Image: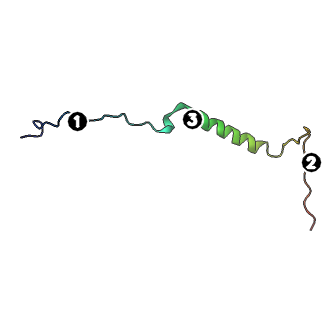
């Protein structure tokens, strides 16, 4: 009996699933990456421009005297 003549039975099924696309192929992933990089750049670019609770620029903290 050859392999092609062999009856697998009705319970045997071949599941053909589509390969999962990596997350790096999703458009929303790249939108999230760009927004995150823009937020990090904005944070670093404005590091010394923090505003206080009253809306005024906080004065520089003097160094501790040794």
Dot 1: element: loop
Q: Position of residue 31 (x, y in %)?
A: 60, 33
Say which label, 1 or 3, has the lower sequence index.
Answer: 1
Residue sitting nearer the eye, 20 or 46: 20
Q: Position of residue 34 (x, y in %)?
A: 62, 36
Q: Nearer the viewer, mark 1 or mark 2?
A: 1
Mark 3 and mark 2: Cα distance apart in space: 39 Å
Neighbour tally class for label 3: few under 14, some 14-19, many 20 plus, Cα within 10 Å = few
Residue sitting nearer the eye, 7 or 21: 7
Q: Quadrant of residue 10?
A: top left
Q: Residue at x 68, y 37 (%)?
A: 38
Q: Quadrant of residue 50?
A: top right
Say which label, 1 or 2, has the lower sequence index.
Answer: 1
Neighbour tally class for label 2: few under 14, some 14-19, many 20 plus, Cα within 10 Å = few
Dot 2: element: loop
Residue beneath disc 3: 30
Q: Position of residue 22 (x, y in %)?
A: 46, 39
Residue beneath disc 1: 11
Q: Position of residue 3 (x, y in %)?
A: 12, 40
Residue furthest toward the top?
A: 27
Mark 1 and mark 3: Cα distance apart in space: 43 Å
Say which label, 3 or 2, has the lower sequence index.
Answer: 3
Q: Residue at x 61, y 36 (%)?
A: 32
Residue beneath disc 2: 59
Quarter of the picture holding the C terminus: bottom right
Residue furthest toward the front?
A: 11
Left-right relation of 44 to 4: right
Q: Residue at x 25, y 35 (%)?
A: 13
Q: Residue at x 92, y 39 (%)?
A: 54
């Amino acid at each position: 009996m050859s392999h092609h003549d062999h009856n697998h039975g009705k319970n045997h099924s071949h599941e053909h699933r589509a390969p999962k696309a990596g997350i790096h192929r999703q458009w929303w992933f790249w939108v999230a990456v760009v927004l995150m990089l823009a937020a990090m750049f904005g944070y670093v670019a404005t590091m010394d421009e923090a505003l206080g609770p009253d809306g005024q620029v906080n004065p520089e903290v003097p160094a501790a005297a040794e």
